[in-house]
Structure formats: structure tokens, C-alpha cells
Image (cartoon, rainbow, N blue to C red):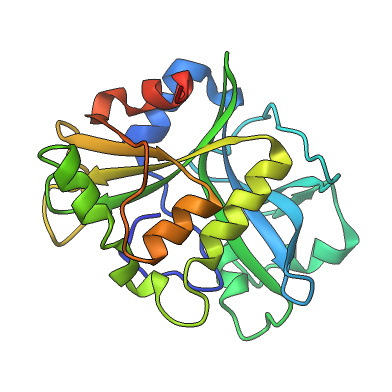
Amino acid sequence: MPQAIPSYVNSIGKIEIDISTDLSRKYGKKNILNIICLGKIIDNGTVFYVLEKNEINSDIKNLPKSQKGIPFVYLDFKSNNQKLYPNYHELQFLIDGKYKSLMEFTLSKNNNDYYTVDIDYVFKSSNGWKGFEFTTFYMPFKNKHEAERLISKINRRPSWKGIYGARSLRRIVKDCEDLNIDLYMVCANTLKKVGSKLDLTGNCYVFKLSIEQINKLEKGQPPTNGILCSFKKFIEVIENGFK
């Protein structure tokens, strides 16, 4: 969830190549996903889990299983002949050539029915399905106390303001519960205030993402039971889980 563009009802994040490359090397391309949760506004619930072709979703995948029976679909806007698989009738309008991405549709004037949020990174490890939301801070995490102080101010960001607040994150938590994905938030540093180039030699702060944690952040409180680690170690921290 890079903060270059605030997100409100519709939220689809940027894929960081350094992260996707590392995940692919460790777990294999078939075991890493970026999942877009396509929901109906009227029902306030997810109706499809979408794999849109991008830097991560380029191969046949192993998939987590929805306990609610929500189907996965694959969307390819990049090919000349746009593809939807399985070819659900209610989604066929997405591949009639009008749109170049699911984001373009959800933000268009033609959309009055759907919202989107995405689970930034999902991977299958020996310890089960793991996932994480990713966001950045330009001030360095010099130590755990400083990291928690900075993260407690995340509620000042535009994406946390207004009537929607942190609704996108709450939806992601609920969908990860449905998919039995162990979900985390990863906060990393960028090299400069302007731009989002990651500080690959800096620190990360990792914590379990839950409704309770989101409530704390919304109140301007730091998360609990987080771990400060180097950027190079945060995936290992997530794989091993929190005791």
C-alpha cells in the first residue's frame, strides 16, 4: 500500500519488484500472488477474488481456498485479446476493450456497483499461506520505539480520513480470514521523502494485522507485539510467524 496516491473506496497497490523477486526466488512463482478482492457495494462484501496479470500474477498459481466458496478469476488486460478465466458472464464487460486494468474500471464513471481492495503480497510457505500489506515511511526506523512512534501517526494520512477511514484494511482482514491467510503489515523506509524508492539496507517494522490493530492505529496508537528487523529479514519473520 504505497502512499503515493491516497486510496478510498477503491484500492489497488503498487507491486515492488524487489519484493516480488525475492518472494519468487524463495517460494517459486506458482506460490506467490497479488489478490484483488472485487466486492459489490450494495452487499459490502467480496464476490470474486481476482488475479490480474501483472509482475506477480503471470503464471498458473496454487491458490488458497475460500471458506465461503468465493471464486477466483484470472483477468488479462495486457494481451491484444483480453482474457477472463473462468468466463463468468457477469464480468464479461471487463474484457470488451474499454479498460486497460481493473483499477481503470473501478475508478470510471461507468462503475456504480463494485469496489476493489487488494492483498498486496500472498505466498504459500511450509507454514501455510501468508500475506502482508506493505506501506512506507520516509523517516528512518532507528529503533523499535521510533518505528512505533512514526507508525502511530499513520492515521493522519489521507487514506485514513473521511467516512471510509481504514475500511479497506478491515475488508482485507476479513477476506484473509476467509482464505485462511496469516496476515501482517510491513512498514518500510524509503530513501527520500519524495518518491517511493525503497531503502533496501534499512529496517522494517512487522506486526500481525487484525481488526484490533487497525482500531489502535485509527486512534493514533502504535500496534502491539511488533518486530523490528532489517529489510532483508522481514519475509523470514513473516514465514516463521509470531509466537
Query: Would you identify the image quadrant in which residue 62 lies?
Result: top right
Q: Quadrant of residue 170?
A: bottom right
Quadrant in the picture for the N terminus = bottom left
Residues 32 and 208: in front is 208
For residue 243, above or below residue 217: above
Q: How many marks can you see?
A: 0
Does the image show residue 196?
no
Q: Position of residue 235 (x, y in %)?
A: 39, 26
Residue at position x 61%, y 58% in the image: 171
Q: Quadrant of residue 57?
A: top right
Q: Position of residue 133 (x, y in %)?
A: 45, 46
Query: Whole-percent x and y of residue 172?
Result: 59, 53
- Residue lying farthest right? 89
Rendered position, 163 above or below 10 = below
Report if residue 83 is visible in the image.
yes
Left or right of 134, for residue 110: right
Query: Which residue is at 44% across, 82% downward?
Result: 162
Q: Give above or below for 159 relative to 62.
A: below
x then y, percent, for residue 104:
56, 70
Residue sitting farthest toward the bottom: 109
Tell me: 235 left or right of 73: left
Q: Is residue 155 left or right of residue 89?
A: left
At horizontal 86% and vertical 65% (from top left) the residue drawn is: 90
Q: Nearer the viewer, residue 142 or 71?
A: 142
Q: Which residue shows up at 43% across the image and 27% down it?
A: 238
In the rendered structure, the answer to whether residue 19 lies left or right of residue 144 reads right
